[in-house]
């Protein structure tokens, strides 16, 4: 049994040309074989209908999924405003694609819509069940969505993926299934394998403040911490650490000072994005009422080490099998904070993988749910999914 993969990148500006370029490169890399599955990530500047149609007509994958993104990369190439893709052909893995709609209104129904297309729940011929999950993060409720997917699959699947991006505009994001692009939706690529599939998670952030109780919250809007306007806690932290906190333009501060939710075995991260007139802080994902949170700190070196550790954890999940390909997701906030140093993080993942194919993108949140890993929906966290050879 064997798995053949190829990952490619394009900086073509026209949508149809970019799709054709990606599809042609993949077909050539696979020796003219139509792949069993293809995954595509693309900047929000593209016309997705034209991009996906050209890619599909050129590459002819049996299954196609993907998402809009906020930075795209393969081994040795990365950028913004670009597109990348991976193609997989395998006689030991089976793939199926599914989309769940209306995430904002009903997460349980969206999860059920996805799972109805999964073949693995009633089939034990491929004992290792994984799903790549990409969601419209701007639809919200990603944590709850992952919980519903876990329930709908009776806990028999592991998940990895992220929230679709739009080049840090935070305006409109899409997920792809076949040649269609959807908003307010989640897409999943079911991966059934005769060999283990590895998932690793790591973030490299540590507490920089005392614990703060979330005393009022509305979804992703943190209204108060310790009974005071949430922005006051960030103001106090900025003053005590000699940093500038401009409430009218807080993102430069927030990129280096995010929230970490205590979980008992680490911190789940949330990126603050803005401050409203009442002093509430709007975050990139939900923060639970009553949680204890810390203002967190990190360095570029810590982020690189965390990505390496996530890769090693994913490789360990293969249980001795050789890696064929990896998908790597990290937050757009990580790229914005690190600047050119983010290239070193991507390179560190590639080095840990050896000769395995590498593809990935910057996302609005990261998804991980696997045995022995810190599960759920994250911000500013490296997630690595490794497929066996």
Image (cartoon, helix red, strand yellow):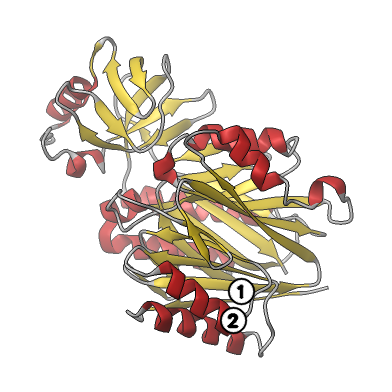
Q: Are marks 2 and 1 in contact (CB under 8 Å)?
A: yes
Q: Residue at x 45, y 70 (%)?
A: 49
**Label 1: element kind:** strand
Query: What number is the disc on residue 251?
Result: none
- Regarding residue 373, the answer to whether it shows in the image is no
* Secondary element type, mark 2: helix
The one nearer the camera, 127 or 165, is 165
User: Would you identify the image quadrant in which residue 358 lies?
Assistant: bottom right
Where 276 sits versus 203, above or below?
Answer: above
Where does residue 63 sit, x and y in percent of width and height? 66, 67
Mark on residue 87? 1
Q: Quadrant of the C terminus?
A: bottom right
N-term-proximal mark, 2 vs 1: 2
Seen in the picture, residue 184 relative to 76 is either above or below; the reply is: above
Residue 70 place in picture, x, y as percent: 36, 59
Closer to us: mark 2 or mark 1? 2
Left or right of 329 in this view: 207: left
Say if 175 sits above or below 52 in the image.
Answer: above
Percent x, y for residue 82? 36, 72
């Amino acid at each position: 049994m064997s798995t053949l993969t190829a990952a490619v990148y394009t900086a073509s500006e026209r949508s149809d040309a970019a799709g054709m370029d990606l599809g042609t490169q993949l077909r050539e890399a696979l020796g003219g074989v139509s792949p069993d599955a293809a995954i595509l990530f693309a900047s929000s500047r593209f016309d997705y209908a034209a991009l996906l149609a050209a890619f599909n007509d050129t590459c002819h994958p049996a299954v196609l999924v993907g998402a809009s993104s906020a930075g795209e990369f393969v081994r040795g190439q990365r950028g913004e405003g670009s597109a990348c893709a991976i193609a997989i052909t395998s006689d030991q893995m089976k793939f199926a694609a599914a989309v769940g709609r209306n995430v904002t209104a009903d997460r349980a129904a969206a999860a059920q819509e996805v799972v109805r297309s999964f073949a693995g729940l009633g089939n034990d011929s491929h004992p290792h069940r994984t799903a790549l999950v990409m969601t419209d993060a701007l639809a919200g409720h990603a944590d709850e969505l992952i919980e519903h997917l876990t329930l709908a699959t009776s806990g028999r699947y592991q998940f990895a993926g992220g929230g679709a991006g739009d080049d840090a505009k935070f305006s409109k994001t899409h997920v792809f299934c076949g040649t269609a692009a959807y908003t307010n939706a989640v897409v999943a690529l079911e991966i059934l394998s005769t060999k283990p599939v590895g998932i690793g998670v790591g973030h490299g952030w540590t507490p920089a403040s005392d614990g703060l109780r979330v005393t009022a919250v509305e979804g992703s809007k943190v209204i108060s911490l310790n009974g005071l306007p949430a922005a006051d806690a960030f103001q106090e932290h900025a003053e005590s650490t000699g940093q500038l906190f401009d409430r009218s333009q807080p993102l430069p501060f927030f990129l280096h000072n995010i929230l970490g939710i205590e979980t008992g075995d680490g911190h789940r991260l949330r990126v603050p994005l803005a401050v409203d007139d009442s002093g509430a802080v709007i975050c990139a994902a939900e923060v639970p009422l009553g949680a204890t949170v810390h203002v967190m700190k990190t360095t570029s070196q810590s982020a690189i080490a965390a990505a390496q550790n996530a890769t090693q954890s994913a490789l360990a999940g293969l249980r001795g099998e050789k890696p064929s390909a990896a998908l790597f997701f990290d937050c757009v906030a990580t790229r914005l904070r690190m600047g050119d140093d983010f290239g070193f993080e991507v390179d560190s993942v590639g080095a840990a993988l050896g000769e395995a194919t590498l593809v990935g993108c910057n996302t609005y949140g990261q998804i991980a749910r696997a045995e022995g890993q810190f599960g759920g929906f994250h911000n500013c966290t490296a997630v690595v999914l490794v497929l066996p050879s």
